[in-house]
Amino acid sequence: MKNSEQTILSARGIGKTVKSGSSDLVILREIDFGVIAGEAVAIVGASGSGKSTLLAILAGLDTPSAGTVELDGTDIFALDEDARAELRGRAVGFVFQSFQLLPSLTALENVMLPLELAGRTDADEIAREVLSRVELGERLAHYPKHLSGGEQQRVALARAFSVRPKLLFADEPTGSLDAESGAGVIDLIFELNRGFGTTLVMVTHDEHLAQRCGRVIRLAAGRIAP
Amino acid sequence: MKRRLRMLAQGTRMLGRDWRAGELRVLAAALVVAVASITSVSFFADRVSRALVRDAHQLLGADLVLASDHAWQQGVAEEIARRGLERAQATTFISMAITGEPGGPASQRSQLAGVKAVSENYPLRGRLRIAPAPNAPDAAAASGPERGTVWIEERLVTALGAPVGARLKLGNASFEVAAVLTLEPERGANFFNIAPRLFMNLADVPATGLVQTGSRVWYYLYAAGPREAVAALESWARGELGRGQSVENLESGRPEVRVAIERAQRFLGLTALLAAILAGVAIALGTRRFVERHLDGCAVMRCLGATQGKLLWVFGFEFFILGIFSCTAGVLVGYGAQFVISGILGELLRADLPAPSLLPALQGFLVGLVLLLGFALPPLVQLKNVPAVRVIRRESGVTKSGTLAVYAAGLGALAALLIWQAGDFRMGAYVVAGFAVAVGCFALVAWILLRMIASGGLVRRLGARSTSLRYGLANLRRHSRGNAVQVASLALGLTAVLLLTFTRNDLVDAWRRSAPPDAPNRFLLGVQPDQLDAVKQFFARSGLGAPDLSPMVRGRVVKLNGKAVSAADFAEERARRLVEREFNLSFAERLPTHNALVQGEWFAPGEDGLSVEEGIAKTLGWRIGDELSFTVGGEAFSARVTSLRRLRWDSMKVNFFVIGPPRLLERFPSSYISAFRVEPGGEPLINDLTARFPNLTVVDVGAALRQAQSVIDQVISAVEIVFLFALGAGLLVLYSALVATEDERRREAAVMRVYGASRAQVTGSQRVEFLAMGLLAGLLATAGAAAIGQLLAQRVFELDLPPSPALWIAGPLAGVLLLSLNAWLSARKVLSASPALTLRDSV
């Protein structure tokens, strides 16, 4: 953290404990780190190391048992859930392992959704443009079930970038894809990241992929490994 | 405001997308059915009540009508003239009209007619309309029929074969048919009238010799004139009224007509409400599925920045717009259906119904929206509570506010709606409570039985033989709560379907069977004591057997245990009517053979006493030992109740409410009455009888029953239109219940396939599960339909309904077949898609 003005995301003393039967299960403890605008950071770790929980907390989808997260200069847990949702809508994009496209919506409508929720009147225009950037300009009217896994993830990428987010959270973006499609999607993520000037925080267990990011944070047993 | 408009736009877009995906069709269909069933009935009711208001003046034929079951005192008629008001008179009674050559009884035809003898200036308000022939253009008549002529309704022209110009006999007098009657001002009185109308001149009545002791005759005085004078006459007349006399004004006009129509409307309304409740259940089930399928989408939207409030508004708008469209469609369908209903009942109503107002449309619209919001909003509210983290951890569900609470809210909304719609708190409460109890019972019994069927021991024992059986039974137990809801919903839909098909037919059959085949089919009324021997001889000569002629004395009950009795003492409508009217009393030495004593002793020789029918004793609160006082033609007598009798009213024999010993009643004026049977082909004998004794009335009970039956059939046909809606709603409930768990089953089957389950194993385990549920739903529905059928038979129709083997076979079979079909369809869906695709879709 060279300069706090450039820090877009910072986590301080994050801890997460859940009840498991009669005992407490510690998932995360004392996580501290910062992300500078424009950076690409990978969070890696074995299964059960707590990386997905950390991502959920950083994005304000889940709440920590201890600690604070500052996103784009705002302490997100000082806000209520609705205010966090509004902040996400303004500044954050998501890509999930399971794509999370709405099955009843076409590719175009899926990309339009966050723009519509933000009240943009040019949703259709922007969605078409971003979809053509991910080379799906010809498949606008297709439903998710008629698209391959790689194509679905590209629609999800288009949806994430359509609102020009400052921060993109990606949770195992290639986890459901074969090697070839996975590689294509990863190339696209980095390309869009550069093109839109977005900060990337990616959870993965793929070392090779992690190495393409500028910085790697390793989690082991709920802590940042040295 | 701008934000709300944006959400409205978003809600509209979502509606379009969800509609396209087929997510909302069942909901919309349920709503259309509910609104259509309710509006069809209220449109019809609205038209009838507007017709009543429009025709109010004409309905009476005057500004004020005085009615009496005995001749009016001369003073009353004079009073009308004295007050400067116009006055007209009428007398009504039932009599046989006969046509044909006097010499040839074989070619004679007779038909019971509702005779109305009127003074020439009748009616004072409105006009009679007549035509020169059936179906010919009619015109208003300047006055009533001239002396020596009659006007008859088209039905009578056909039945008697008596066109204009023909002659017909009434009692001792002969008349020329001068016109076909097309419209009678007091048409209200014709609602549900059975005997066709015959108009004659009042001055001709004495010549017929038809008005004698024992005749049921009504006497009317009509008055018209300035409003104040009419009002003054009314208040004067009310003070002069005796027993059996009443005043009818525009407000009270023909209350008995209104009661009949209101009863039919209530029956229609009840059926419509049933359809609405069933549709509500379909809406609840449909919304539940909608919510389950939108949990992931909502989590994504939360992720993408949608606040809870925004989600609620967007979904609220989506459903509101859906409601607007569906309710509009429902109102249009209801508007169409009411044309069918009024078409079917049109013949009974015999009135041109005016166009309906907009109120029923508005009412139906609101009912639809309340139904949708009551049943759909509570589950929708759950959607906004979806945690955003569900996108990463799918197991993060919704904090459920409890299914029961959700449905309680829906039922609460519905209860409020029913009471508002029916305007009857008790009826609404009964329907809702009965429905809630039935659903609760179904769900509880289903849950217990499902757990029993799937008990560990049984699964192990049976499951050793077949994997499918083991999985199927285990699934029953695993899903016992969801399955119980599904079985209860299925049973509910199936109950409605069985009730409207099997039970309804059983009831109608039981009603038809209730009269024995050799029962008497004619009543003979008005035999005077001096005609007894001649009539008996006629019967013996004609081979009709000895008639069982019972004496009849008409009296009015005036005191109970020395205290004056009046209609005001009773709350029950039937009791008030009984007290108002004259009783048919009879006297006999011995208990009639078709009666049975249930309490007390038959009077010993030389003793006074009264034997009373147990039903009427209960209605009027009479007990053994009570002293009853009657007046007969101005003379009074008293006696104590010494016994109670049970009758079989459907035996078609002559029955009396009150019987005394001859020494008590013989001295009063009496006429004799008999029931007898005429085999088909014996009609000429009847013509002969009425030609020989013109003052006698022979009522063809068979024809009357057939006519009553055709009236009932018309009402049933009208109700069936509304039944169709209820049936449609029942089927929607069935469908919604079936698809409710489809997604979950598809996922499970896909997982089984992934782990190597064969086609047979997948379909087999589903079949076992569905078979058990189908059987259970079928049995519950059958029990439900049978119980409701018994309740209706005993409480409403007073019939014995034997258990129906067909119902007990068809009900469970329908359940099994329905769910087997569903199992087959659902297995096909699962097996036709690759497991990977199914699983990918569902993650």
Image (tube, grey):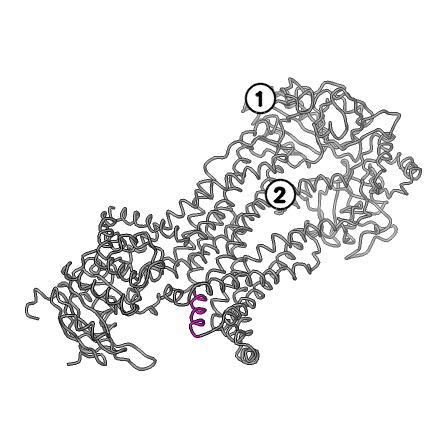
Camera-nearest residue between B654 and B482: B482
Q: Total marks drawn?
A: 2
Q: Which residue is mark 1?
A: B225
Q: State whether the magenta stretch is mostly helix, strand or loop.
A: helix
B750 falls in the magenta region: yes
Q: Residue at x 52, y 39 (%)?
A: B336
**Where does residue B224 sit, x and y in percent of width and height?**
59, 23
Q: Residue at x 39, y 61 (%)?
A: B292
Q: Secondary structure at mark 2?
A: helix
Camera-nearest residue between B304 and B251: B304
B135 falls in the magenta region: no
Q: Quadrant of residue B633?
A: top right
Q: Is residue A145 above or below residue B711?
A: below
Q: Which residues are magenta?
A: B742-755
Q: Quadrant of residue B446?
A: bottom right
Please tell me which of labels 1 and 2 falls first in the chain.
1
Q: Which residue is mark 2?
A: B717
Identify residue type, mark 2.
Ser
**Where does residue B438 sit, x and y in percent of width and height?**
55, 61
Q: Badge 2: how crowded within 10 Å, few (<14), some, or many (20+)?
A: some
Q: Chain of mark 1?
A: B
Q: Quadrant of residue A146?
A: bottom left
Report the side of B566 relative to A44 (left or right). Answer: right
Identify residue type, mark 1.
Gly
Contact? badges 1 and 2 (CB < 8 Å): no
Please identify the quadrant where the N terminus of chain A is shown: bottom left
Badges 1 and 2, same chain: yes
Camera-nearest residue between B322 and B113: B322
Please identify the quadrant where the C terminus of chain A is shown: bottom left
Report the side of B763 relative to B182 (left or right). Answer: left
